[in-house]
Image: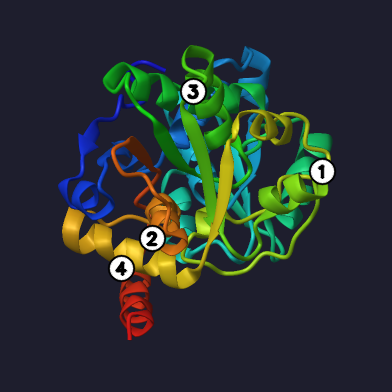
Amino acid sequence: MQGRVVRTPLIRSESLSRRFGCEAWLKLETLQPIGAFKLRGATFAMSKLTDEQRQRGVVTCSTGNHGRAIAYAGSKLGVNTIICLSRLVPANKVAAIRALGADVRIIGNSQDEAEVEALRLVEEQGMTYLPPFDHPDIIAGQGTIGLEILEDLPQVNTIFAGLSGGGLLGGIGIAVKSVNPAVELIGVTMDRGAAMVASLEAGRPVQVTEYESFADSLGGGIGLTNRYSFEVVRRVMDQSYLVSEDAIARAMVHFAEQEKMLVEGAAVVGVAAIEQHHLDVRGQQVVFVVSGHNVALDTLDQARVIATASLG
């Protein structure tokens, strides 16, 4: 991965440290070449392809950022890629994937429906399927974030990360807890269409309805035949929280106005969770994984309107 993936900085947030009474740190995955952490897993997985697999090409489904990561890695490695997306994927993310030369297929109204098309291409064309999260190499690649956090902040107490299919949180959890099991790992997602949370509550992978959200990157199912990420998350995650669209919007506006960062909703759910659920992190060393910045300006404008209205 060296030379293809950025070792991102961990910077202290003065505003969040004051606001929450802790030492707040931001892991800036926004600085990856594609603007999101997904490049780590995609790059690691694609680097392990055989020559035959590279010739046949790679297919995936995505809510946006993983597809962009696969397309980017494919362009660097000379591998043809097909990215299957649902109609819920924002137009700016679709355009960014196409700009990297990938063949984009828009299928259905959910990631699960897009996955059906991806798996059909595997059967018919012999392509290699690299899923967004449920793959050992994808999970391992995302786990390098955890290793970097420990190198930069060995005394970390709590890590907040977005919770979707579990690749990000699972990878970080494996890496961090293998070194320091006492670190608390908290997963956060939107309060509608939260597939992993619903699956954990049911004790098995379940399907949920997908909805539009400021945290669109956290949408999508985890797959009814999930083999890896469900069990990993169940093992390493200490707590999970659901957050409202209002709370996500307020956190996005905070990052824009106080941190001077344009980030997507999925990147701020940890901050939203502390605010909405009045979590006590005083005196702790807290890391927020700022997972991506692939958001359209009009989405931030919408967030600003909702944030203002929610504050009365």
- Residue sitting at 18 percent across and 58 percent down? 258
Name the spot of residue 123 as percent of width and height, x first: 83, 36
In depth, the one of 166 and 110 nearer the eye is: 166
Q: Nearer the viewer, mark 1 or mark 3?
A: 3
- In primary-sequence order, the first of circles 2 and 3 is 3
Mark 4 and mark 1: Cα distance apart in space: 39 Å
Q: Mark 2 belongs to which amino acid? A: Glu
Q: Amino acid at mark 1?
A: Gly
Regarding residue 161, the answer to whether it shows in the image is: yes
The residue under label 2 is 275
Q: Residue under circle 1?
A: 203
Pick the front one: 67 or 248: 248
Secondary structure beneath label 4: helix
Quarter of the N terminus within the rendering? top left
Q: Secondary structure at mark 3?
A: loop
Q: CA distance from mark 4 to mark 2?
A: 24 Å
Instruction: Report helix, strand or loop for mark 1.
Output: loop
N-term mark: 4 or 2: 2
Q: Which residue is mark 4?
A: 297
